[in-house]
Amino acid sequence: MQYRELGGSGVEVSEVGFGAWVVGTDWWGDRSEEEGIEMVRHAIDRGITFIDTGDVYGHGRSEELIGEAVAGRREEVTLATKVGYDFYENPQAGHGELPKVIEPEYIHEAVGRSLDRLNTDHVELLQLHNANVSEVDGDVLEALDELRESGKVEAIGWALGPSIGWLAEGDAAIEAGFDAVQVVFNLFEQVPGKHFLETIADLDAETSLLPRVPHSSGLLNEQVTPETELDAGDHRGFRPDEWYETGWEKVEALRFLERADERSSSSSRTSSGNDRERTMGQAAIQWLLAHDAVASVTPTFRTAADVDEWAAAPETPPLSTAEIERVAECSANDFGIERDDGMKGLRSSVDGADLDGVGAVQAGD
């Protein structure tokens, strides 16, 4: 495993991180709490030391289980969590969005409760969870600075959701000097991630991107195929059928990314046992890591085999310039697919206006 600095914070994160929304929830399939804990520990053993959770995942249960998983190994890991959703006073029905409270007093209180659940006195990264740009004022920024000065937090980030104002929020975070912006970003969903890369370059900013859903809800690692039946409550079931139908065709267009290193031999096997082979799932991670502003990629791990394969991704051959250019050509031509993928509603910003000119669909279109 290799490591990168998170923004200019001095915090180091593993190039592959652990997205802990699979621990303490059933949103990505059923697993026992014991299985979740063991998967986290296995990930740490494989060098995946950046663990990203959130207080709302399982209404605090994910943080509790992460705290248990890293007990005795706290110095080995970099912990990140998120605050902003008030699940303390509001029951959640299914996958509906909870009320948010992005206010100084609430943030301080929520961080204290998160630290208690994680059984630690600090987290390396605190992220505002799906906050709208209008909610983050000077008082909120001051509260974040206070948390950093107190030692409870080392770095500050902004985690963007799939159906709120991506561009306005991400640009605001970069302009304000946040250490990290977390966003859905993968070979199929390149907006707004590519836009943020341009903003970082234009401003010569130190902000890092933390791509999540790098495998596009199971398509790019081929865990979701035409024969797959998702468990009840699995978050991926909220993707429309058209998304998967067009996605399977896009995967076929990217088969050129799967290859074996000609130098491979029995002595150069990766720890995943792939003889330096680059699987589609590993290529999806390598494509993201090819961008200098990306600090860590957080896949959705479901099994120990996932951990083994994706922990080895940074060891596989990086994408060549020709491969990166071919990916760009595929994306520009929408992979040669003319029909709709059914995702217009999930691409919209708060008001749609800030998506002009970047290739995404405006609200109401």
Image (spheres, rainbow, N blue to C red):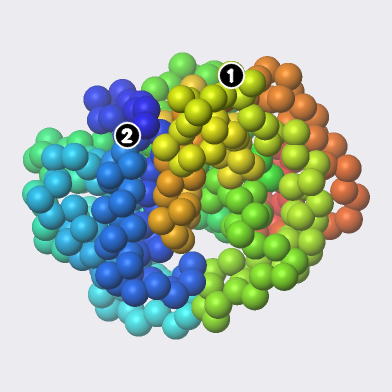
**For the residue labelled by badge 2, is the local secondary structure a helix, a strand or a loop?**
strand
Left or right for 306, reference 41: right
| 40 up-or-down from 200: above or below | below
Amino acid on which the number 2 mark rests in the picture = Val
Residue 263's label in the rendered image is 1
Neighbours of disc 2 within 10 Å: few (<14), some (14-19), many (20+): many
Quarter of the rendering containing residue 333:
top right
Which residue is rendered at x = 55% and y = 81% of the image? 232
Neighbours of disc 1 within 10 Å: few (<14), some (14-19), many (20+): few
Which residue is rendered at x = 75% and y = 33% of the image? 256
Which residue is rendered at x = 33% and y = 64% of the image? 36
Give the mark nearest the N terminus, 2 or 1: 2
Left or right for 365, reference 46: right
Residue placed most toward the observer, 14 or 186: 14
Question: Alpha-carbon distance for marks 2 and 1?
Answer: 29 Å
- In the rendered picture of this protein, how many numbered marks are placed on residues? 2
Residue topped by disc 2: 13
Q: Give the x, y percent position of residue 213.
A: 53, 51
Residue 158's label in the rendered image is none
Label 2 or label 1, whichever lies nearer to me, is 1
Q: Give the x, y percent position of residue 359.
A: 74, 40
**Which quadrant is home to the C terminus?**
bottom right
Which residue is rendered at x = 54% and y = 25% of the image? 265
Quarter of the rendering containing residue 276:
top right
Residue placed most toward the observer, 195 or 340: 340
Residue placed most toward the observer, 248 or 227: 227
| 326 up-or-down from 354: above or below | above
| 311 up-or-down from 197: above or below | below
**Which quadrant is home to the N terminus?**
top left
